[in-house]
Image (spheres, grey):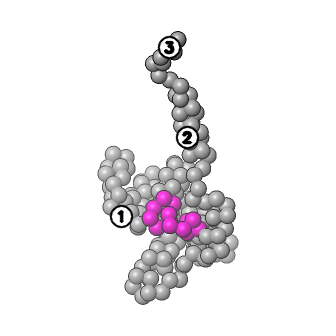
Amino acid sequence: MQLYFFTSFGSKLERSDRFSAMPGDYAYFSVVVTFLIAVLSVFLNYPSGMPLLGSSFIFAIIYYWSRIEPNAQLSFFGFVIQGYQFPFALMVFTMLMGGDIWMDVLGLGAAHIYYFLRDVVPMEYGKEYLKTPEFMNKLMVRAGAGQPGAAANYQRQAQMRQQRDMRFQGEGHRLG
């Protein structure tokens, strides 16, 4: 389930208007949220912090996506809910199944701090505290971020093969 959430909501978030402009924005989001999760985990479990924080990172991705896509319609076990309700529906589901929600709360807290510093503060106070550093954008451009991947290359090659194979098809006319 975690892997599905990571791939699904991670790609939705990466393709959103918030991160599609500059290739380093999503990587910077990942670095900042990971740092915030590590710091907050020390506060929740002093002095060593919590051991496995992957589910918190995935929940942070889900929460931040829900903040930038609040009106998206989702189906969750047959119930149609709005995007802003999805993280809380996941937490309720985890509690109903007897799970611990502290890792979810940790991810929610880190993502909300990021959301507040990245989206709310610049709009309300005119100060940008979490602007993506230019070296991060240059690094991602050099690594090829934002370029079509292997699937796009395969599809393009298949289209070229199909066009090449169809070049000489037709009814044909006898010349002699």
Viewer-side residue, 159 vs 85: 159
Mark 1 and mark 3: Cα distance apart in space: 65 Å
Amino acid type assigned to the residue bearing label 2 in the image: Gln
Looking at the rendered image, the disc whose residue lies closer to the viewer, 2 or 3, is 3
Label located before the other in sequence (2 or 3): 2
Q: Secondary structure at mark 3?
A: loop
Q: Nearer the viewer, mark 1 or mark 3?
A: 3
| Span colored in magenta | 14-26
Q: Mark 2 and mark 3: span between their CA atoms?
A: 36 Å
Residue 125 vs residue 59: left or right?
left
Q: Secondary structure at mark 1?
A: loop
Q: Which mark, by number, is residue 155?
A: 2
Which of discs 1 and 2 lies nearer the camera? The answer is 2
Which residue shows up at 56% across the image and 63% down it? 57
Q: Amino acid at mark 1?
A: Pro
* Residue that badge 3 annotates: 174
